[in-house]
Image (cartoon, rainbow, N blue to C red):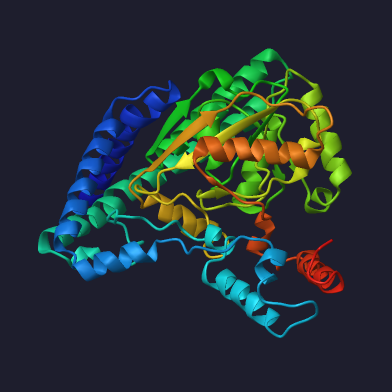
């Protein structure tokens, strides 16, 4: 009996602290300064660890690490220029050397597949993701690493799980109740309040520190917000500062319960798997949404998959065929405190959330950019590339032309055939594409 009373007191004290110091400030969008103090201590600790590593690590290891993050210089000249010095008028066996060289370059440093793995860090952040066992350099550093494991798994993880459970529960219950109200301005206001509050709680569950820039360019109702995609929490990051209408595929399980509850309170656009393949149906429903200037802006991630936040890959043109105003948003995470990238081919959702909740914090910058519209004579592909370039420049990301679908699919035969056609033209034209 005494054990049950003690457990009850511990639980009540725990919930009181969570309610008083985290939940209530989240509801009103204020901070008590606890997270700022935590971040300052964390930054000082990581700086100290970096100094200890530099002092204790052998020079050979340091040189090896610095060399491993270098970039291989690749010859980006076109095929006809690369082969001009190797071949004569007709086919030459020496042409094989050129294609072998290009093949080896692609294997050693592939522009695509390296974007679907976690970004390598210059210095260890006292987490497990590192190429060198830095925590064995000195006894003091090892003790700090062990202390960090205890703090992350025994203090932060239970707190974050509690906050996430409360945030998701309130979202499901709140949107379900609001959804019972008739359509009115009051319902819209309550829906936005529930979404904002619950997303703020969920961001606190990740110890999220978000810096928003250029708030005067925040997406407006009746528009389309497009952003680069790194993680499922991109939605939480953006919704913490404003509400959006989500676009996505219908899911089952817990995600399906959340989707069905959310759509009752807010006009989110969910598609069945078969409907997602019907491009005209998707375009029609999105056009109907943006035609109503009273509805929330649509949030779309045109890459279609998560990229490791080092680059921006090809934007699907469908989002830019709808018309209306595009509001670009650039999101850049700081990998020093935690890796936000979701490698869905390696980790399921549960494993990914566990990695997120046992990291130090999620720190990111969000830049709102001036709205953009399609220019006269500009097709959807050109417009999508222009928006992609603007986001990449603002976020300091590398711009790549490749389709993010290569994460799970093979290279299209058309890409291979294009290179074969170029080579055959060179043979037929005696070394010239003309």
x and y percentages locating residue 397 in the rendered image:
52, 44
x and y percentages locating residue 347 in the rendered image:
52, 62
Left or right: 16 in relation to 244: left
In the image, what residue occupies the spot 36% across and 51% down?
Answer: 359
x and y percentages locating residue 166 in the rendered image:
46, 38
Q: Quadrant for residue 319, please give it.
A: top right
Q: Nearer the viewer, residue 279 or 18?
A: 279
Q: Quadrant of the C terminus?
A: bottom right
Q: Is residue 273 visible?
A: yes
Q: Quadrant for residue 21, please give it.
A: top left
- When the figure is inspected, residue 49 is found, relative to residue 25, above or below; the finding is below
Q: Is residue 133 visible?
A: no
Seen from this angle, which residue lies furthest top? 185
In the image, what residue occupies the spot 30% across and 69% down?
Answer: 64
x and y percentages locating residue 10 in the rendered image:
25, 42
Seen from this angle, which residue lies furthest bottom? 93
In the image, what residue occupies the spot 62% across and 51% down?
Answer: 400
Q: Nearer the viewer, residue 94 or 47?
A: 94
Left or right: 233 in relation to 68: right
Q: Nearer the viewer, residue 120 or 91?
A: 91
- When the figure is inspected, residue 297 is found, relative to residue 422, above or below; the finding is above
- The mark total stands at 0
Q: Nearer the viewer, residue 4 or 424?
A: 424
Seen from this angle, which residue lies furthest left? 139
Q: Quadrant for residue 280, please give it.
A: top right
């Amino acid at each position: 009996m005494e054990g049950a009373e003690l457990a009850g007191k511990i639980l009540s004290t725990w919930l009181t602290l969570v309610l008083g110091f985290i939940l209530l400030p989240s509801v009103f969008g204020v901070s008590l300064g606890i997270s700022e103090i935590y971040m300052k201590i964390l930054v000082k600790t990581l700086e100290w660890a970096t100094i200890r590593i530099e002092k204790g690590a052998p020079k050979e290891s340091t040189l090896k690490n610095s060399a491993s993050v270098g970039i291989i210089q690749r010859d980006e000249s076109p095929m006809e220029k690369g082969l001009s010095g190797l071949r004569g008028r007709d086919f030459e066996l020496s042409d094989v050397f050129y294609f072998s060289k290009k093949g080896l370059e692609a294997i050693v440093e592939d522009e695509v597949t390296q974007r679907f793995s976690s970004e390598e860090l210059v210095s260890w952040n006292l987490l497990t993701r590192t190429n060198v066992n830095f925590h064995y350099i000195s006894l003091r550093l090892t003790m700090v690493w062990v202390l960090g494991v205890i703090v992350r798994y025994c203090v932060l993880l239970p707190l974050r799980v509690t906050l996430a459970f409360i945030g998701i529960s309130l979202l499901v219950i709140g949107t379900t109740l609001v959804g019972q109200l008739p359509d009115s301005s009051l319902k819209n206001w309550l829906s936005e309040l529930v979404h904002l509050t619950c997303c703020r709680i969920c961001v606190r569950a990740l110890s999220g520190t978000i810096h928003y820039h250029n708030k005067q360019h925040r997406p407006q109702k009746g528009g389309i917000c497009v952003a680069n995609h790194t993680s499922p929490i991109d939605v939480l990051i953006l919704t913490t500062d404003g509400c959006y209408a989500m676009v996505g595929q219908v899911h089952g399980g817990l995600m399906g319960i959340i989707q069905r509850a959310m759509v009752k309170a807010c006009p989110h656009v969910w598609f069945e798997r078969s409907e997602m393949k019907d491009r005209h149906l998707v375009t029609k429903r999105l056009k109907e949404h943006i035609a109503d200037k009273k509805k929330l802006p649509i949030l779309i991630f045109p890459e279609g998959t998560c990229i490791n936040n080092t680059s921006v890959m090809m934007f699907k043109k469908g989002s830019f065929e709808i018309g209306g105003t595009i509001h670009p948003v650039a999101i850049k995470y700081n990998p020093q405190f935690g890796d936000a990238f979701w490698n869905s081919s390696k980790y399921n959702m549960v494993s990914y959330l566990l990695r997120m909740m046992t990291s130090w914090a999620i720190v990111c910058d969000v830049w709102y950019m001036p709205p953009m519209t399609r220019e006269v004579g500009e097709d959807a592909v050109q417009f999508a590339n222009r928006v992609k370039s603007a986001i990449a420049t603002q976020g300091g990301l590398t711009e790549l032309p490749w389709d993010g679908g290569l994460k799970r699919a093979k290279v299209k035969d058309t890409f291979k055939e294009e290179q074969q056609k170029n080579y055959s033209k060179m043979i037929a034209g005696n070394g010239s594409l003309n």
